[in-house]
Image (cartoon, rainbow, N blue to C red):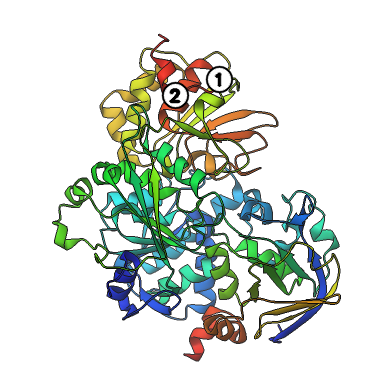
């Protein structure tokens, strides 16, 4: 695992009827039919398996990819699977206008860096832009555009750099 | 300046003089994990927990409620893995017979007003119903709480919602929750701590409070607190000064007012709990199945009301009625009072206590095109199967089962 503060990769821009996809809940990210899976390596295949228009995501995702979504990403249940399935695929980050509260915690605790971009317009970034996310500054760049979001909080940064909540606890 | 309810609970649990946006470590009174994600909690503790993975045994326990008894081998394996871990560390397991963990925690009076509870159930914020803090978290957080008794927490902004007026006869707590979902359907409450006031909540039963607070997750809120009223204080056998309330000069980000005067029964159509209509607008929808239960509407009050409505009536031909009491204690009381017979005679199926329809099949899933009326809290696409789930209160669910189409409780009096 690398702990770069600048993540570069191909950007998946999730859209629903031409707008950034909002309210993607944990059953769309990782369906409850696969909750008994406890081996992270086996979770990747189910990522977005119940998300209209992106059911083939797991087959087409490449290690290093970044994901962009609209409001309230990861609302719903507390399942850690909805974070771990992306880690299993080598997806580096999810960037969204906002996140469900539990999802935000789960991501931070597993050392999966997420950034919020409140107010992001629907069409600033395009599917498969080569993008760059500055975690410390909270800035997403891609194509010829950039957008200033919320910088990573101090707690999130420390947990991320430690590699997860338990690893962070050892540094306390 | 005074403090809000969440700020006072956080302060009394190690958060110091904290305010919105502060990231603090808080002490957790009740540390729980359910069969779903519980095995991953065990996995984390085996990997990172060292020689002493449990900080305090008496405050730490497992509750099985998702898939009870297990109907898949992976779930059975996970439950058994938890039992073995629990035996080794002498932890209590509320096993497959116990019912919904969040309700057991209140029933056992562990979650008293002003306390803190965490678990792997996203509706653990149901503790807001008794003026206590509760939060669903993932397996990493919960494993950390098992080991240390603490979690980190970013203190949210607080908002106040005052419910004004008196709902119409036959309108339930669920309808008021649906009215709130309709009003705040955007992302207005996302990440907020909500405090609910007004004459309705001041006289609500404990069960009504549970129903209303259980929809906080669907509103996007961190929690929906109902300041303990006399009914809740009586349940815990405590005086007002033993509970925690917001200071009268506390600062709120927003002060909302919601008019519920004369409110009629509501229903949330698929695919979202915020897609709310008057029941009267949907009475042409034919129904295939009805589910009564869940952490939202599975209490003794809910099921005894359902039994009263169903007594002497019959479920419409071709309609499945599935009933799941929330806890074993509820089951026992319904049994003792003969109310299960009323449900049975009407044509209902009664399952053992548990989460019922929400978690992959305790009482079956819906098929393509199937219309289900559910008293639970989520109707997202795919959540309870391939069918179309509508969310409603007990009266609407029972009336719809009898009439074979979406119907309000008012229509039931015309049928016998």
Q: Quadrant of residue B174?
A: top left
Screen quadrant of the N terminus of chain B: bottom left
- The number of numbered discs placed on residues in the rendered structure image is 2
Which residue occupies the foreground of this view, A141 or A77? A141
Residue marked by disc 1: B405
Front one among B311 and A140: A140
Residue B71 seen from this side: yes
- Residue A119 is situated, as x and y percent measured from the top left of the image, at 65, 67
Is disc 1 surrounded by few (<14), some (14 to 19) or many (20+) residues within 10 Å? Answer: many
Secondary structure under tag 2 reads: helix
Determine whether A99 is above or below A17 in the image: below
Co-location on one chain, circles 2 and 1: yes
Q: Chain of mark 1?
A: B
Instruction: Identify the residue at horizontal 43%, vertical 33% (top origin).
Output: B393
Mark earlier in primary sequence (2, 1): 2
Pointer 2 local density, CA inside 10 Å: few below 14, some 14–19, many at least 20: many
- Using the image, name the chain to which the residue with label 2 belongs: B
Q: Is residue A165 above or below residue B311?
A: below
Give the left or right position of residue B368, taking residue B258 as reference: right
Q: Which residue is mark 2?
A: B398
- Between the C-alphas of marks 2 and 1, the distance is 11 Å
Q: Where residue B50 appears, x then y in whole percent?
A: 47, 81
Res. B292 image quadrant: top left
Label ID, residue B161: none
Q: Is residue B391 visible?
A: no
Relative placement, left or right, of A151 versus B363 is right
Secondary structure beneath dot 1 equals: loop
Name the outermost residue toward the bottom: A171
């Amino acid at each position: 695992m690398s702990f770069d503060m600048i993540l570069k990769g191909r950007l998946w821009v999730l859209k629903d009827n031409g707008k950034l996809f909002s309210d993607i809940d944990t059953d769309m990210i990782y369906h409850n039919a696969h909750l008994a899976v406890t081996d992270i390596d086996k979770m990747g295949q189910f990522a977005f398996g119940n998300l209209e228009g992106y059911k083939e995501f797991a087959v087409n995702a490449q290690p290093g990819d970044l994901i962009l979504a609209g409001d309230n990403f990861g609302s719903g249940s507390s399942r850690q699977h909805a974070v771990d399935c992306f880690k299993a695929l080598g997806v580096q980050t999810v960037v969204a206008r906002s996140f469900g509260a539990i999802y935000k915690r789960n991501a931070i605790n597993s050392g999966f860096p997420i950034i919020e971009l409140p107010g992001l317009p629907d069409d600033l970034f395009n599917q498969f832009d080569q993008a760059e996310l500055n975690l410390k500054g909270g800035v997403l760049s891609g194509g010829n555009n950039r957008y200033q979001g919320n910088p990573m909080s101090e707690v999130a940064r420390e947990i991320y750099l430690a590699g997860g909540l338990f690893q962070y606890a050892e540094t306390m | 300046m005074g403090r809000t309810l969440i700020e006072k609970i956080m302060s009394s649990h190690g958060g110091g003089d904290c305010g919105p946006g502060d990231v603090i470590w808080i002490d957790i009174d009740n540390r729980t994990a359910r069969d779903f994600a519980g095995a991953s909690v065990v996995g984390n503790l085996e990997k990172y927990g060292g020689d002493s993975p449990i900080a305090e045994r008496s405050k730490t326990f497992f509750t099985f409620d998702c898939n009870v008894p297990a109907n898949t081998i992976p779930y059975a394996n996970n439950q058994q893995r938890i039992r073995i871990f629990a035996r080794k560390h002498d932890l209590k397991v509320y096993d497959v017979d116990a019912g919904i963990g969040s309700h057991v925690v209140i029933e056992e009076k562990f979650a008293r007003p002003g306390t803190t509870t965490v678990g792997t159930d996203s509706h653990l914020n149901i503790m807001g119903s008794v003026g206590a803090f509760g939060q669903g978290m993932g397996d990493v957080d919960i494993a950390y709480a098992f080991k240390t008794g603490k979690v980190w927490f970013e203190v949210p902004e607080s908002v106040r919602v005052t419910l004004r007026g008196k709902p119409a006869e036959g309108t339930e707590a669920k309808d008021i929750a649906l009215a709130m979902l309709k009003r705040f359907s955007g992302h207005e409450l996302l990440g907020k701590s909500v405090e609910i006031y007004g004459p309705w909540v001041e006289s609500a039963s404990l069960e009504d409070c549970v129903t209303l607070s259980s929809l906080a997750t669907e509103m996007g809120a961190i929690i929906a607190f109902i300041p303990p009223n006399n009914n809740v204080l009586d349940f815990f056998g405590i005086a007002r000064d033993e509970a925690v309330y917001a200071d009268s000069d506390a600062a709120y980000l927003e002060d909302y007012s919601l008019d519920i005067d004369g409110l009629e029964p509501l229903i949330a159509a698929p695919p979202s709990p915020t897609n709310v209509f008057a029941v009267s607008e949907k009475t042409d929808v034919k129904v295939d199945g009805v589910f009564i239960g869940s952490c939202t509407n599975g209490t003794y009050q809910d099921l005894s009301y359902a039994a009263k409505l169903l007594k002497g009536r019959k479920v419409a031909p071709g309609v499945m009625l599935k009933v799941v009491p929330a806890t074993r204690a509820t089951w026992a009381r319904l049994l003792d009072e003969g109310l299960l017979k009323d449900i049975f005679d009407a044509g209902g199926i009664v399952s053992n206590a548990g989460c019922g329809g929400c978690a992959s099949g305790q009482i079956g899933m819906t098929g393509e095109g199937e219309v289900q009326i559910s008293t639970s809290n989520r109707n997202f696409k795919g959540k309870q199967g391939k069918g179309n789930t509508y969310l409603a209160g007990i009266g609407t669910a029972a009336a719809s089962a009898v009439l074979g189409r979406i119907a309000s409780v008012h229509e039931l009096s015309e049928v016998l």
